[in-house]
Each structure stands twice: as structure tokens, then as C-alpha cells.
Image: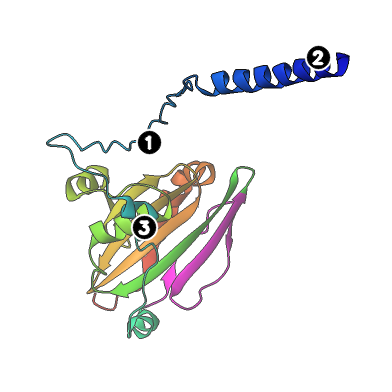
Amino acid sequence: MLLNKSKKQITLLICGSILLLLLSGCEDAVVVSYLVPKSPASTTVQTLPEEGTVKPDLSQLSKTPETKIPPQTEMQLLKGMQGSADAQPEIIFSLPDGWNDAGSSGMRKANLRINDPSGSAEVTALSFPGDVGGNLANVNRWCGQIELNSIDQAQLESISKPITISHHRGTYLRLQGPQKSILVGILPFHGNTWFFKMLGDTATVLANELAMKNFLDSVNIHDTNH
């Protein structure tokens, strides 16, 4: 009898468990949804140039800067110049104190040297056929030699001084540069032009200006036309 009672209890327990399972299966399932925000899309904003503005030309950045051609600073010897110089007469002059005579050579009818505590300079005498481009062109070439700006005709006239060389009327100029300077006597002479030019360190050139004028006063060119 006890066995039957136990069987009944076991049966009731099993039936109750089945009933609970059935009841729990009938409940509505709860659905949970999540809203995941989208990542904001990257947006490229193109800015248009304002009206009236000019877009820069970037291709210009890689271009080589314009090369400036330096002014011509040396006399270009043309055909016949050496022959004309050789045909010119020799010159006689007095050598100032402290100057050294290096002798004539090539185009140079005189070739003098100066050395002092301030620096050095050279004095040359040259003769060319014609006017060799005119005084303005020659003076601007010399300006380039001593780092001076070019000048115009009015400026040339303001710095030109009359001088007499070998009984002929000529022109005297002083060109003073930051490091180098020039003193020059220009003499038109029977279809040719003579240049008596001192070029050197500014302090030496200026200290020898009186000696240069005395040298020019002493110059004597043999004149077959008189």
C-alpha cells in the first residue's frame, strides 16, 4: 500500500512539472530592439573662390627664377683694333712719385702700377679707332666694373670736367664705387680715342687723384698732323 502511495506521489510530481513547463511556454516572448546610431558620413566641402579672385598658378612655383644678364664690363676687341693701336704713336709722360712703370704691351701704350698702405691701382693708356660707342656707353661699362648703377646723358654731363691732354681738349671723370673707383681722361685724337684710366681700391685711387691729374698734364702724344 505504501508502494502505491509513492507511485501516486511520483506521478503527481511528474504531471505538475509537465504542467509548469506548458504554462511557461505559453507566455509571450519579449522582443528587445536596440537602435544603433549610424556613424556620420565624412563630407568634403568644396569652397569656391569668391567672385573676382584669381586662383594661384601653382605651376609657377617650380620655375627657375629669371636670370639677369650682367652688364658688359670688358671692352670687346674687334678686328682691326690691335692694328690701329700699333699704328698709334708712342707717348711721353712724367712718372709720379710712388708709381711703377710696367712698360707698354699689346693694346696698352702705358701700363703703370701703384701700391700703398690703402691698397693698389693700375693706370693704363689705350687708343681705339673712332669713339668706341661714345662716352655714355663706355662710362656705363666702367660703372658696372665698380658696382655702380648706370647713368643717363644728363648725369654724365654733370660729372664730366674739361681737361687738356697733349694740347687737345678732352674730358675728365671720377667714378667712385663702394670698393673700387675709377679716374679717367678721355681724349679724341685725330679719328681715334685715347683712354687714360686709373682703376683700383677706392682709398688708393682717391689718394692719387692729384698725381693722376699731374700725369695727364705731362702726357705728350707725338702729333704728325701738326
- Residue at horizontal 42 percent and vertical 24 percent from the top: 35
At label 2, which amino acid type do we have? Lys
Q: Is residue 72 left or right of residue 18?
A: left
Q: Quadrant of residue 82?
A: bottom left
The numbered disc on residue 13 is none
Query: Mark 3 sits on what residue?
Result: 63
Q: Quadrant of residue 139?
A: bottom left
Indicate whether residue 189 is drawn in magenta. no
> Which residue is more in the foreground, 126 or 11?
11
Q: How is the image coloured?
A: rainbow
At label 3, which amino acid type do we have? Lys
Query: Mark 2 sits on what residue?
Result: 5
Q: Quadrant of residue 13?
A: top right
The image shows residue 34, relative to residue 189, as above or below, that is above
Residue 7: image location, x then y, percent: 79, 20
Location of the C terminus (image quadrant) = bottom left
Q: Is residue 111 left or right of residue 117?
A: left
- Residue at horizontal 50 percent and vertical 19 percent from the top: 27
Q: CA distance from mark 3 to mark 2?
A: 111 Å
- Tell which residue pokes out farthest to the left in this image: 52
> Which residue is more in the foreground, 203 or 98?
203
Characterize the local packing of mark 1: few (<14), some (14-19) or many (20 or more) Cα atoms within 10 angstroms: few
The image shows residue 30, relative to residue 60, as above or below, that is above
Disc 3 or 2, which lies upstream in sequence?
2
- Residue at horizontal 47 percent and vertical 78 percent from the top: 106
Query: Mark 1 sits on what residue?
Result: 42
The image shows residue 41, relative to residue 152, as above or below, that is above
Disc 1 or 2, which lies upstream in sequence?
2
The magenta stretch spans which residues? 89-115
- Tell which residue pokes out farthest to the front in this image: 1
